[in-house]
Amino acid sequence: MPKKDLSQYAEEIRLGGIEGGSTHSTLVIIDGKGTQLTEVKGPNTNHWTIGMTETAARINAMVLRGKEALNIPETVPLDCLGLSLSGCEEEKTNRLLVETMQQNYPNVAKDYVVTSDTMGSLRTGLDTGGIVVIAGTGSNALMIDPDGKVTGCGGWGHMMGDEGSAYWIAYRACKYIFDDIDGLCQAPEPISYAYPALRIFFNISDRKDMLPYLYTNFDKSKFASFAMEVANGCEKKDPLCLHILRENGVLLAKHIVALARKAGNDIKLHEGGLNVICVGSVWKSWGFMKDAFLEEIHDSHAMDELTLLRLTASSAIGAGYLAAEKIDWIFTKPYEKNVNVLYHYKRENYVKPTIKIESEVQLVSCK
């Protein structure tokens, strides 16, 4: 694609963007003006969990469905495909994914750009620097400076963390239940709701029946989905579930604090302060995490102003924007229409809750 005015071809340009998580993926195809033409849902595309070959096959299948919806022949490649996928944090493996696509499926796209899922989320809602915190099945946080420098916090998977995620919520609930019954450590609140909820959700009669779910037949997405029952417990005002969501709020705040301490004023002094895009279903429980989250932010003194943003468009749009930039295609991007404000914090206006919230989170049950 030559670097010149190609506006006369805007209707003919076809750019793809895929947002890929550990549970599901989304493809959008846009034209040269940035107008979304179609959207396709697909499965997990994390190459660390399903392998590079299967990841490429799933990407190809999604693009074929998108082309079919737009009556684009299979042999006509997209001008560029942006892949913002969970697990795509390393340049070496990202290159391998592109090579696999080009070798196995040469008609998918003429060019590619591969980034982590956090980058796609950020570029959907912000045109300059900022932070993205993903709290879905897993968790990850990324800060991008206006000059393109990337700094991360978390994103190491369930074996090394995933704090603040649905997986962590489910794990925390199970750990409290197991330790309390064993007598190893007493749960901070009664397990009278959580333990019956666990037995019903996994269809078990005893804790030993959980072993296949934890080891032989472990499915991170299935296990993490128990977090929905913890959220339901919060709706019913169960003390233990409320305690777990407060802990989770602290951990999400800690991700932001860690990155804010490395941020320059060009990010911190942006309109609205430090802009943070909040991605993932865990943020739907914001009301139960809010007080603990804000107290952690306030006590850290890492920032004076913060704006939490929720995307109103798929992160696949941001992946499409990255695809456009890869081939030097320019069009106006409606960032402000792609986000809503979840919360605006300002130090001078903050009032601490009357009830003290314990913000020192232990990552093991016993203190």
Image: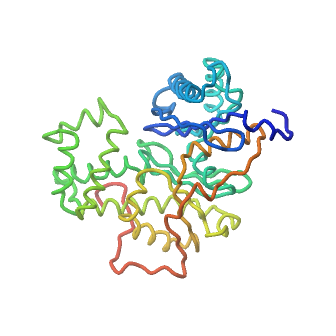
With respect to residue 339, does 304 lie above or below? below
Residue positioned 51% across, 56% down in the render: 278
The scheme the figure's colours follow is rainbow
With respect to residue 326, does 297 lie above or below? below
Kindly indicate the quadrant of the structure image that contains residue 238.
bottom left
Q: Is residue 305 left or right of residue 213?
A: right
**Residue occupying the far left of the picture:** 205
Residue positioned 57% across, 42% down in the render: 316
Kindly indicate the quadrant of the structure image that contains residue 219.
top left
Q: Quadrant of the N terminus?
A: top right
Residues 168 and 181: in front is 168
How many labels sit on residues?
0
**Residue occupying the far right of the picture:** 4
Residues 271 and 332: in front is 332
Q: Is residue 296 left or right of residue 170?
A: right
Residue 101 x %, y %: 62, 23
Residue 360 x %, y %: 39, 66
Q: Is residue 257 left or right of residue 151?
A: left
Residue positioned 58% across, 52% down in the render: 142
With respect to residue 253, does 355 lie above or below? below
Q: Quadrant of the C terminus?
A: bottom left
Residues 270 and 355: in front is 270
Residue 298 x %, y %: 49, 73
Residue 53 x %, y %: 53, 22
